[in-house]
Structure formats: structure tokens, C-alpha cells
Image (cartoon, helix red, strand yellow):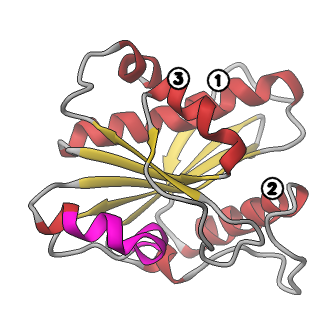
Amino acid sequence: MLAKTVEVTRVENEADLIAVGSFRYNCYLSEGLISERPDKLFLDEYDYAGSAHIYMLRSGGRIVGTIRLHVLTADDHRSATMAAFSDILLPKVKSGLTLIDGARFAVAPDLGSLRLSIARHTLRRYALYADEIGADYGVASVQPDRVQFYSRLYGFSQISEPRSYAGLNEKLVLLGVNLKANNGSESQTSVA
């Protein structure tokens, strides 16, 4: 049972990271995005990158959502999204733009009608962090069937064809949004 409140915390230790890895594993496995793994964890090298900021949302004593955010700059741009789409993203960071990359987004599959609310609450962390760091451009890699959702609610545009992406069974597309151009627009404010 979910509580009326949702607590957002940043992953600060190995125990939290393992809990997020287990949660991600269950979410991604239920959607067929990954195959079964003996350790029942879905973590990768980018969880340990200096640019990674991993958040989890808890309600009713359990994790209900998570997102990993990377701040990508010319000096530090390691992320799974950069690895998959470097031809598109590297020129942006080399030109001096600061990018925010939302990755490994997951929401508990058993929430029923509350799932959309938790998804929006999780994505709100993306918007708040983008504002905190003054990001110029936002990116996210998503399943092709979710492009319209991100476009309609958050102003993202598809900027790539589907590509293989860091350990997933399905190809993802890259979405982008100019955060400076959209500052204050309806699509931007609906994230926050």
C-alpha cells in the first residue's frame, strides 16, 4: 500500500544502490527490456560515474520510482546515453552546452492507476535538477512507443533513430529539449 506522501532521496551508499539495482531489475524485467540475471540486479558502470546522481522515490516503505541523472559537460560526459548517441551529443557538450541526461528511469509496475502519478513525480526530479544546475539542454533515451508522451507533456523532440542501448533488449531513441528556449513554457512547467 502506498502512503499519501512520496519521499525523494538521493542514493548515497552501496546499500541504496543495490536496492535501486534490484528495483530496476524487477521493473525492466517485467517490461521485457532485460533478460533474467543470476544476481537479480540491473546496475552498470555509469551508476559509478562521477556525473551520476541517482534518485529513488519511496512510498509505503518501498521504492516506487527511480531515475539516474547525469550532468554532461565538455569536461565530464560519461553516460550510457552519451555512449549510444555520442555523434549527436558530443558536439553539443564540446560547444559549451551543459546537458542533463535522464536514464534508467523506472516506476513500479504494480501501481495500477497510480503509476502515471509516480512517473510524473519521478520526472519532476529531472526538471528540478536541470534548473538547479542551469542545464542548457535535456536528453532522454526512451522506447519508441513513449515518444509522444514525452513530446506532449515535456516538449521533447525525437533526435535520433532507434539504437542499441547499454544492456537492453530493445532499441531506444534519443529525445532532446532546449531547456533555455522552453523556460517557462507550458510543456516545461508541467514537468515541475
Q: Position of residue 175 (x, y in %)?
A: 46, 48
Q: In the rendered structure, find residue 27 and report the number of the disc placed on it.
A: 2
Q: Quadrant of residue 145?
A: top right
Q: Is residue 116 above or below residue 58?
A: above
Horizontal relation, residue 107 to residue 121: left or right: right
Instruction: Locate the C terminus and report the quarter of the image it occupies.
Output: top left
User: Disc 2 and disc 3: Cα gap in Å?
Assistant: 22 Å
By secondary structure, the bulk of the magenta-drawn segment is best described as helix
Mark 3 nearby-residue class (10 Å; few <14, some 14–19, many ≥20): some
Q: In the rendered structure, find residue 50 and report the number of the disc placed on it.
A: none
Mark 1 nearby-residue class (10 Å; few <14, some 14–19, many ≥20): few
Secondary structure under tag 1 reads: loop
The amino acid type of the residue labelled 1 equals Thr
Q: Is residue 89 magenta?
A: yes
The amino acid type of the residue labelled 3 equals Leu
Q: In the rendered structure, find residue 5 and report the number of the disc placed on it.
A: 1
Question: Which residue in the rendered view is the most extreme toward the front?
Answer: 161
Q: Nearer the viewer, mark 1 or mark 2?
A: 2
* Stretch in magenta: 79-91
Contact between labelled residues 2 and 1, with CB atoms less than 8 Å apart:
no
Secondary structure under tag 3 reads: helix
Q: Quadrant of residue 187?
A: top left
Secondary structure under tag 2 reads: helix
Tell me what residue is drawn at x 68 percent, y 65 percent: 171
Tell me what residue is drawn at x 47 percent, y 32 percent: 124
Horizontal relation, residue 134 to residue 24: left or right: left
1 or 3: tag closer to the N-terminus: 1
Q: Is residue 54 above or below residue 192?
A: below
1 or 2: tag closer to the N-terminus: 1
